[in-house]
Image (tube, rainbow, N blue to C red):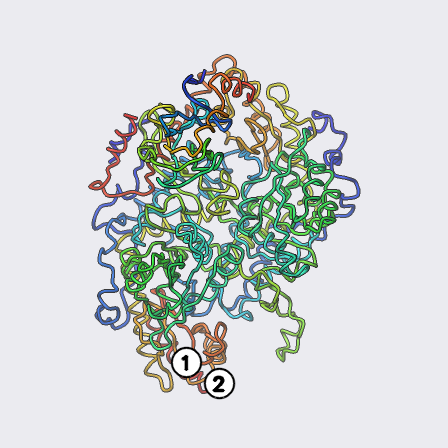
Amino acid sequence: MASNITKVTNHISPNEALIFERSQPGRAGFSLPALDVDESSIDEIIPREMQREDALEGMPEVTEVDVVRHFTRMSTWNYSIDQGMYPLGSCTMKYNSRLNEKVARIADFANLHPLASESAAQGALQVIYELQQHLAEITGLPGVSLQPAAGAHGEMTGIMIIRAYIDARDGKEASAQRRTMLIPDSAHGTNPASAHLSGFTVKTIKSTAEGLTDLDHLRELCAHGNVAGLMLTNPNTLGLFERNIQEICRIVHDAGGLVYMDGANMNALVGIARPGDMGVDVIHLNLHKTFSTPHGGGGPGSGPCCCTKELEPFLPVPRVVASTSVGDSDSEHRLKPMLRLDYDYPQSIGRVKAFLGNYGMMLRALAYILTHGYDGLLEATQAAVLNARYIAHGLLTDYDKPFDSDPMHEVVFTDKRQARKGVHTLDIAKRLIDYGFHPMTIYFPLIVSGAMLIEPTESVGRQELDQFIEAMRSIAKEAVEDPELVLNAPHSTRVGRLDEAAAARKPVLRWKPAATESAESRSTASHSS
Amino acid sequence: MLEEIGAASIENLFDSIPQELRLRDHLNVPAAMPELELLKRFDEMGTRNQAARRISFLGGGAYSHYIPTVVDSLLSRSEFFTAYTPYQPEISQGTLQSIFEFQTLVCQLTGMDIANASMYDGSTAMAEAVLMAERVTKRTKVIASSAIHPQYLEVAHTYVQHAGIDLEHAVYCAESGTTLPESLSGLDDQTAAVVVQSPNFFGCIEDLAALAEKAHSVGALLIVTVTEAMSFGLLKSPGACGADIVVAEGQSFGVPLSFGGPYVGLFATRDKYARQIPGRLVGEAYDKNGRRGFVLTLATREQHIRREKATSNICTNEGLIALAATIYLETMGRRGVQEAARQCAQKAHYASREIEKLEGFSIPFSAPFFNEFVVHAPVDAASLLEKLASGKGIDGGIALSRFDTARANDFLVCVTETNTKEQIDALVAGLSSSTKLV
Amino acid sequence: MASVPDNLHYSKDHEWVRVEGDIAVIGITDHAQDQLGDVVYVELPKAGDEFAANDSFGSVESVKAVSEIFTPVTGKITETNDSLNDEPEKVNKDPYGDGWMIKMTMKSPGEVDSLLTAAEYEDFTKAEE
């Protein structure tokens, strides 16, 4: 089957086929002990009409070494944090400590069933309880739920909490009039999507020429009434701290609304300032950003939700609490307060996920906090901001920086100067790959034409920052001297730019046996178009 | 560096934050802990998870299956676990091709046409399926079986509470333990979907074909949820029974229990609904030299483009756990998954036969089951299981009183290929002896 | 330069209208398809659906964007260009010909007079940039 792919080198790795194309009937990579109980006829225990008829036809049949080579070869086609700087803005691609991986694999946690009795899972509950306390301290918001599985899930949770709070405060009838959620035009797409899922109508707030929330527009929208809340990212997605944050919160609160903060950019604030002190009512954090749990090629994440005392009764259930009644006869339990799951919150928005959330991520995040300590957390924030500022300074000579203010942990540039030569953000990003870097976030935020959002994080040193700046400057030069070179980049990868339009017009979303759809016919079809 | 950028001090970098908001003191978190101390601390906390070392017959949405060593070994390649979402296809082909394989495997197992790149877990996948059914049918009533995992139902209620969807329950049959088509009394031409789990929360296998026929008769969709994905190895696929959307918890495929997460939600449906599916999709694509690669596709459904009109708010999914499931399924392969499923069923039926022989014990539901079944004990089940755990070091099952107070003497037993005959015999003996202590 | 045929009427939302008796043929302009990039999907209404002027009647998708499309005139759909299901690229290749989207019977044919002429539309797109 490999003959379908043009060889790009003599090495076998670039031509690794799909596992289904490698499959050979009769091969196997597993070994299980023989069945050790008396066997019944299968038809006796499960009626024939309920049994599979296809015997899993089409599923791969390969050996263990086939699998190992398959994934090892494919892994070499990925860029990863361990290879170098991964400056995706708003994604906080910081180093993922191996120690945290080890902690998450400790058998006493990895083998623990989520429905095990609470008394026999006290260690696991302690991890949750301690992490809740640390996140409350870091955000200045005392109510914490670790149940949400990712950032968008935490957003949905936070916005549902706002809705439930307003329902309780104003009564269902009056609350039904309050269905407007204000969201800046620079926000992540998840914000409006989460607001919609919670039954709100989105109104967009403009940004000023400086790149900050337009206070006049905010006042105007609040004056219209019906405002349930504001979803604000701070520092915002342009990397700028909303210095009027207290005034923003005041305006929204005066209008009877609540302030939700998207914590995607908390890496600029940990140890420096706390959302709770700014007037924020509820926030979600991304453990897979700020607290270094690995992104895993698109998850798992973890999106804890932290809120004020007033909003605490509305958090998802169950909550992990320390038992207040220590009337246990067991003397050991008297010394150590029992932790337990508490379902008794009648105003709760309900459960957002089965069991207790992405627990493995909690172990890693707690390990991150404990290995850093208060001073290490502060230092990480300082280094993250210093690194971004250094890049902001270093690229000024060659790239257009649309906002004058000093950025925090990430900085936005545009392709304005290069576009004159027909070289756009996408081309610059692709060319950066040839220089050994993962591209920055591109075309986001949407309000900046040709945006390049760069977030170096604290996990790079000056030498690598200098190399990155040099690469970017070199690309700027190429854009003038040899634009074709940039327009056709990347030149160094296993595949070139893929025809995404053809892929979307006639989507092929799964492999099928050659009889119904051969890779060859697809290939010719795409050539002729 | 400070000098280079013209800043006087590190503090000056934060000048845009108003002084009164700046923390004057350090955070009240502990001082940095060296590696050695940290590991000791977590090991110590781990020792207080006694349940992790017990012989276990716990299921109920999280299952203890054998995980081949290669799964974690390959998963630990940092090219996979320290990569981001594959937004730059030229340097993400490893992740993209493995997701394409994952989508294919999910289709093969569920008997469906297309599958997405994963959801958070089975429970949120089921909630998203309900929302999708409303989009597809433009109807607002959904009928869910009461034999679905109680936590899954709770999540569904949370998700739909502001979506204008009326989520009703169809009560399961107390004799068979299944959802009978005639229990769907609320079914009408305003019904978007019927939702069932199979094997259901009690382990009973539902008659999916009959339920599909009933739902389709009024133009409603059938959504099938599976929490024990190993059952795909033996049971007729929901797709072959006529399901329109199939969601599942994929934890059974190579993912450790890890106290409830991270797991992975599987989501599959019919071709015609491709533009209504939530979450990411990977598709085949070619470069200008005709080389095959893979890209994220049909992205206009998603939040970063369609914002409040997106099919879901999901962004980050469970990429690495989907990879674990992919490695697992490819290593076990066609025959391995069938063999593991066969052993689960055989061992569970052996256990049920032996338990049924005990005096005072019975199996209350008559429907066929896969590897989980409800046991009715002569005494209070929670107390019995507690005695069994403390006395014999065996977690014998899940007391159903945790979910339904009317079922005080009932508990749910799960047996997998990891449970030996010796363990099953110890469970049976332990149940017998512990009953006398309650 | 994007082409702007003289014989058509144009809306500020970048749709064009060609009047054929009491039927209006509607599509998106060359300028619009150029801004969108490669069209990968077109969502169209069904014959028989009724729309007022400026209603959204469907959407056009490129790889990374979705744009709503609006009816410049009031009326009832008589026919849609179903071939766009299989070949949405026709919108890029021939926006005024094979890439047409819907045909409507016009309720008040006078509405087209309030639309832009080719020259006006050209000025409008220039001013927009």
| Residue B11, placed above or below residue B68 | above
Q: Secondary structure at mark 2?
A: loop
Circle 2/circle 1 CB separation < 8 Å:
no
- Callout 2: residue from which chain? B
Q: Residue at 41% of width from left, 80% of height from top? A: B431
Q: Which image quadrant for residue B6?
A: top right
Is residue A259 among what the camera can see?
yes
Instruction: Quarter of the image for the C terminus of chain A: give it.
Output: top left
Instruction: Quarter of the image for the N terminus of chain A: give it.
Output: top left
Give the residue pinned by disc 1: B431
Q: Residue at 45% of width from left, 65% of height from top? A: B168
Callout 1: few (<14), some (14-19), or many (20+) C-alpha neighbours within 10 Å? Answer: many
Q: Residue at 36% of width from left, 26% of height from top? A: C20
Are dots 2 and 1 on a single chain? Answer: yes
Q: Secondary structure at mark 1?
A: helix
| Furthest residue in direction top, as rendered | A481
The amino acid type, in three-letter code, at marker 2 is Val
Q: Which circle marks residue A271 in the picture?
A: none
Camera-nearest residue between A390 and C103: C103
Could you tell me residue C54's position as x and y percent?
A: 49, 34
Camera-nearest residue between A474 and B147: B147
The amino acid type, in three-letter code, at marker 1 is Leu
User: Which numbered disc, 2 or 1, marks the residue that appears first in the sequence?
Assistant: 1
Label tally: 2
Could you tell me residue A84's position as x and y percent?
A: 52, 33
Give the residue pinned by disc 2: B438
Q: Is residue A477 left or right of residue B4?
A: left
| C-alpha gap between disc 2 and disc 1 | 11 Å
| Residue A247, placed above or below residue B390 | above
